[in-house]
Image: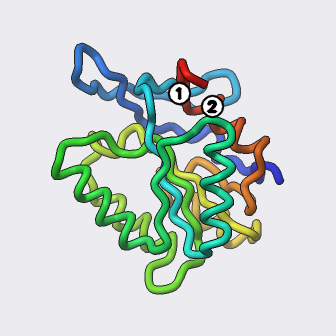
Amino acid sequence: MKIISTKFNTMPFEINQPTQGSPVPVSAQASISQQPTFTEKDPLTYIVEDDRANNFLCKMTLEEVGITNVSSFLRADLALNDLKELLERGEVFPSLILLDINMPAMDGWGFLNEFRNFPSVAKAKTTVYLFSSSDHPRDKEKAQGYPEVLDFLAKPLSEDVANSLKEKYFRLSNL
């Protein structure tokens, strides 16, 4: 599968780059010619996907390409609780969140609504991709109201897309 093309590839977002041990907000524009660079040794990735098989396959695919610091969640509320714990401990938020849209109890939209309530400085370098098996125009239109969402990824996650994500968002010396 490939990344579903949308206009989100040029949405502005903020990233933090460590400067003498403390993050400093920096404006960035994600585009083909200018990609965000993360300097953590092992950036964290979240998979928020209720389908156990797809969750497992996504995690395995990411690990195959060298993205090994992955936390996966079968429910959106559990991922939000984990983010709250990271915030309380003063730890770095994930660099990347792969978020399923259609989940029971709390769907991806509900997750995004709650995610917006986190302090900007905590979530500033987090990029969210909606993870979907469909590319329904209604979902793409709705996603435009969420600047946190960069783009859509088609399920299942392919090794090519995982490599593309690694090249785009992670600069790891051990990969």
Q: Position of residue 120 (x, y in %)?
A: 29, 45
Residue kind at label 1, given as amino acid type: Pro
Quadrant hosting residue 142: bottom right
| Residue 63 higher or lower than 139, as above or below | above
Q: Position of residue 2 (x, y in %)?
A: 81, 49
Q: Position of residue 135 (x, y in %)?
A: 76, 66
Distance, label 1 to label 2, CA atoms, is: 7 Å
> In the rendered view of the protein, which quadrant contains the C terminus?
top right
Q: Which residue is mark 2?
A: 168
Q: Position of residue 5 (x, y in %)?
A: 77, 49
Are the residues flagged by discs 1 and 2 in contact, CB closer than 8 Å?
A: yes
SS of the residue under disc 1: loop
Residue sitting nearer the eye, 130 or 161: 161
> In the rendered view of the protein, which quadrant contains the N terminus?
bottom right
For mark 1, does the 10 Å Cα neighbourhood hold few (<14), some (14 to 19), or many (20 or more) residues?
A: many
Which numbered circle lies on residue 36?
1
Please tell me which of labels 1 and 2 falls first in the chain.
1
Residue kind at label 2, given as amino acid type: Lys
Residue sitting nearer the eye, 124 or 170: 170
Residue sitting nearer the eye, 26 or 44: 44
Residue 64 is left or right of residue 44, and the answer is right
| Residue 34 higher or lower than 102, as above or below | above
